[in-house]
Image (tube, rainbow, N blue to C red):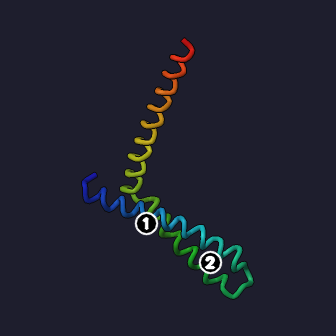
Amino acid sequence: MTEQEKRVATQRLGVLTVFRERLIELETDATLVYPKGHERNAGAQKDLDDLSIIVDRLDADPHVIELQVIAAEADLAAATAAVETATAKLRALRS
């Protein structure tokens, strides 16, 4: 991944995070605030559907996925190091 692709992926990942939060708000609007039968339900449902399409596209973006994999690998490495440190401390206490 080039630096430019990484910058773009980082921006898209930020947008994806914000849009996922908004998706929850729109789902609440479409189901609870403006339930079926309410005059604003159709508009709320359309907003929800439109944003769902955008979120799905961002979720499928190869650069975003690659960035998520890199972040997950870093998290896994940090967690593994923490487990190894804790295990070493436990062994030291038991000996």
Q: Secondary structure at mark 1?
A: helix
**Badge 1 is on which residue?**
15
Where does residue 64 sit, x and y in percent of width and height?
A: 39, 56
Structural crowding at the residue carrying mark 1, measured as other residues with C-alpha within 10 Å and reported as few (<14), some (14–19) or many (≥20): some
Residue name at image x 45 percent, y 38 percent: 76
Tell me which numbered mark, 2 or 1, is placed earlier along the sequence: 1
Q: Is residue 12 above or below residue 91?
A: below
**Badge 2 is on which residue?**
45
The span from disc 2 to disc 1 (Cα, nearest Å) is 21 Å
Where does residue 73 sit, x and y in percent of width and height?
A: 41, 41
Q: Is residue 30 above or below residue 75?
A: below
Where does residue 36 sit, x and y in percent of width and height?
A: 73, 80
Front residue of 17 and 84 = 84
Q: Secondary structure at mark 2?
A: helix
Q: Residue furthest right?
A: 37
Q: Residue furthest top?
A: 95
Q: Is residue 81 above or below residue 26?
A: above
Q: Residue 75 appears in which quarter of the rendering?
A: top left
Q: Residue 94 appears in which quarter of the rendering?
A: top right
Query: Which quadrant, please, contains the C terminus?
Result: top right
Residue name at image x 69 percent, y 80 percent: 34
